[in-house]
Image (spheres, rainbow, N blue to C red):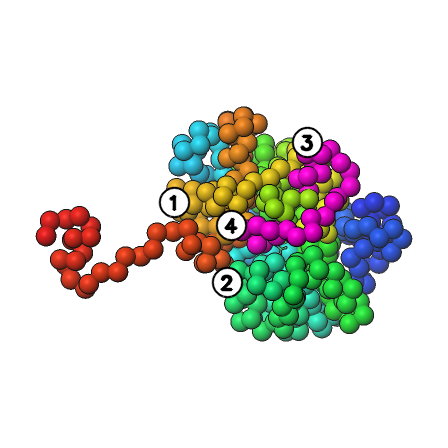
Amino acid sequence: MVSYEVRCIECGASHDPSKPAYACSSCGNLLEAQIDEAEAAGDLAENGYSERALSVWKYREAIPVDDPSLAISLGEGGTPLIRCKRLEEELDARNLWIKFEGTNPTGSFKDRGMTVGVTKALELDMSVVTCASTGNTSASLAAYAAAADLDCVVLIPEGKVALGKLAQAMMHGADVLSVKGNFDQALDMVMTAANEMGMYVLNSVNPFRIEGQKTAAYEVCDQLNGVSPERLYIPVGNGGNSAAYWKGFKEYDSMDFASGCPLIRGIQAEGAAPVASMFSENSSELVPVDEPETVATAIRIGNPANWKKTVGAIRESGGSASTVTDDEILEAQRFMARLEGIFPEPAGAAALAGFMKDLEEDLVDRSAVVVCVSTGHGLKDPDTAISQSVKPRTIEPTMEALSRILGGAD
Ligand code: F0G
């Protein structure tokens, strides 16, 4: 097991890792797990990790759990990094890649965090796990809780979770509570209830979830043969994933397994963009958006719990955050589906939408090595896909009808 510390990102106070904790007991700020990088690097190299297949647990010596052989795993990570030749041609870009996280076991990047977080729940002897969710976190947690034989309670905003995600949480046997409110309110409820009711919280304020998600950055560097991309475009909702990537890039660089770190461009939907507003207004405090709204329901979040982590990460990378409209998100979704054969849910197209906007506004070098993170699979949200596609045409079961409709001779 790698040596590590759980500490506050603000005051640095150290916390007992054998007790569930999500906020600093001295100053209330977010916590992070910090591994001993030199030790992890030595163990990874000694155990020949580079020969292992790509997956979250390829990097097990850098993941702070007691015994990786006891991990609850569904085969997460090892997602494709796809070179987008047709998009490059369409957009006049030279080096565009999409990291397609929709191929994870439950169809989103959340599985990287859950394999570690649910393994940690077992280590801590918790019997109930919980989260608030715009859909994917609940789908993933429900699956991993089922595999771990843990009870699972999820709170979701009523009427605002895409159909596929709801089906997943229900099918995996979670207790699904539909809150007459938004994600931010549901998360407040979870954070208040968890300690009192003895539940382990697996939202991205859980520092161990981030430790699983950071492996996506390690993977990207491995897939680019040991070099980090120049730019990473990534959607920002609650702010956990963007912070996790940055942590991963920095660790992989300092462990000497990759060179460099990318500039991070955080992308938010225009109707749910409190982090992007901090950048446009050059402010150091988050002003929550009371009634966030966007077609990308996964990132329909007005008060991101991890805003300090993600803003710190984006700034340290030399990057910034900005917005895209719902129409721009849907256009990028169609581009990915029709030019590359990649089917993302709307939030999973936001990063590409951000890159396309930067190209239009001449804010990016067209030959830069760019990775856009596509966070979730399009099958999760069939309604949005169908509503912007051409409806199937109904025909009689005859050759005559077929050739008529396809324009052949009849
Ligand atoms: N993309 C997708 C598909 C997501 O499901 C989420 C978050 C994000 C991007 C944003 O990631 O919150 O780490 O900044 N979904 C959460 C959920 C909130 O409940 O499923 P973030």
Which residue is located at x 81 percent, y 55 percent? 23
Instruction: Tell me residue 341's x, y (percent).
Output: 40, 47
Residue drawn at x 71%, y 73% as measured from the top left: 127
Label 4 sits on a secondary structure element that is helix
Q: Which residue is mark 3?
A: 318
Q: Which mark is residue 302?
A: none
- Amino acid type, label 4: Pro
Pick the residue in front: 185 or 211: 185
- Indicate the quadrant containing the N terminus: top left, top right, bottom left or bottom right: bottom right
Residue position marked by numbered label 4 in the rendering: 346
Q: Point out which mark residue 164 bears.
A: 2
Which residue is painted at 41% across and 55% down in the image? 386
Work out how far the residue at label 2 is from the one at label 3, CA to CA, in angstroms. Answer: 36 Å
Verify whether residue 295 appears in magenta. yes
Q: Could you say whether the residue bearing mark 1 is in a helix, strand or loop?
A: helix
**Location of residue 343 in the rendering, given as x and y in whole percent from the top left corner:** 44, 50
Could you tell me how far apart the alpha carbons at marks 4 and 3 are, in whole angstroms?
Answer: 26 Å
